[in-house]
Amino acid sequence: MSTPRLKVFSGNSNRPLAEEICKHIGIPLGEATVTAFPDGESFVKINENIRGHDVYIVQSTCTPTNHHLMELLIMIDAAKRASAQRITAVLPFYGYARQDRKDQPRVPITAKLVANLLTSAGANRVLTMDLHSQQIQGFFDIPVDHLFASPVFFKYLESFRGENLVVVSPDVGGMKMAAAYAGILGAGLGMVWKKRTSATTVESVNIVGDVAGKDVLIIDDITETAGTLVNAAKLLRANGAVSVRAAVSHALLGEVAYERLQGGLIDELITTNSIPLDCRGLPIKVLSVADLLAEAIVRINNNESVTSLFKVKGF
């Protein structure tokens, strides 16, 4: 059986990333009209023949989250009705992932709802990266390829590895990921115990581990207000840390975050282009995940394993 022809399309959330993915694959970005009516309703028209094709729709559900999610759902429906053979929703950033459990009375599990919506719209599989919690894969009744940005981070962080480096998790939930980074980078391991006082405010309470005289690397999957990072950095410096860097997969920085980062407590914020980011002259290093996603798309199209993409070369 021959491999179906490959087409990549993009919504409006992160077109530069989609273009970079296509450049790595060696194909042009698919032509599609993705716009809105005056009343705000999204309109999609695929401007080329995709009958029998393997279609990949690149769309991060970042701000404005609901608008970009609707764009994605409508693009999937348009591709389905245009007789695409297989449709893969490529979400470099999966929005609503933090609403993955019922931790209060009478609240939804929105991460599951979004999974249902993607499936109902017509997606045959999902390709995503660094989910807030890995069990979200179980919310889908279709295949999910869950990539990690860590190979991209490790390549950049190689120059920082050594005995003077300590990898710190900003909370208990991130200890497994921090331990993996510490093991590969040959670094020490620590943790900041935090207490969240509101949706935008975090109080860092205590440190587990020795950071005095050390270069500290904070590992996290997502930051929006930078409250966790900045408060952790403040506590780490108070306990003798020489420098503080943060590696965060998805930086959804709002105005509050930019104000906090201007304080200089974090020497460098290392993140990816899973969402568009304006660095505003701040010490933010943006690493591209286009090569990683492009390789995954080619392997899925060829019905090959993506396991090797998790391997870290040179460590």
Image (cartoon, rainbow, N blue to C red):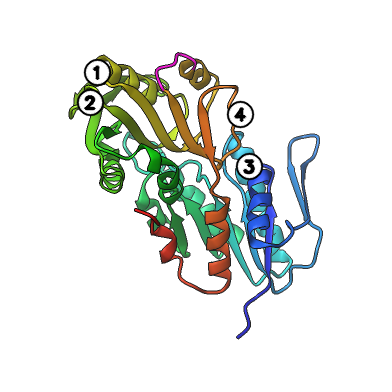
Q: Secondary structure at mark 2?
A: loop
Residue 12 in percent (x, y) is at 69, 43
Which is more foreground, mark 4 or mark 2? 2
Which is more foreground, mark 4 or mark 3? 4
Q: Name the residue carrying label 1.
A: 240
Q: Secondary structure at mark 1?
A: loop
Residue reaching furthest to the bottom: 1
Q: Name the residue carrying label 2.
A: 211
Distance in Å between CA atoms under marks 1 and 3: 43 Å
Amino acid at circle 1: Gly
Q: Residues within 10 Å of mark 1 (few under 14, many from 20)?
A: some
For image coordinates 18% across by 27% down, the residue present is 210
Whichever of callouts 1 and 3 sits on the residue coming sooner in the sequence is 3
Distance in Å between CA atoms under marks 4 and 1: 31 Å
The answer to if 265 sits in the magenta stretch is yes
Whichever of callouts 4 and 2 sits on the residue coming sooner in the sequence is 2
Is the magenta region chiefly helix, strand or loop?
loop
Asked whether the beta carbons under mark 4 and mark 2 sit within 8 Å of each other, the answer is: no
For residue 58, above or below residue 287: below
Q: Name the residue carrying label 4.
A: 278
Whichever of callouts 1 and 2 sits on the residue coming sooner in the sequence is 2
Taking the image as drawn, is residue 252 in sight?
Answer: no
Compare residues 207 and 162 and report the one nearer the observer.
162
Give the magenta part as a residue range. Answer: 262-266
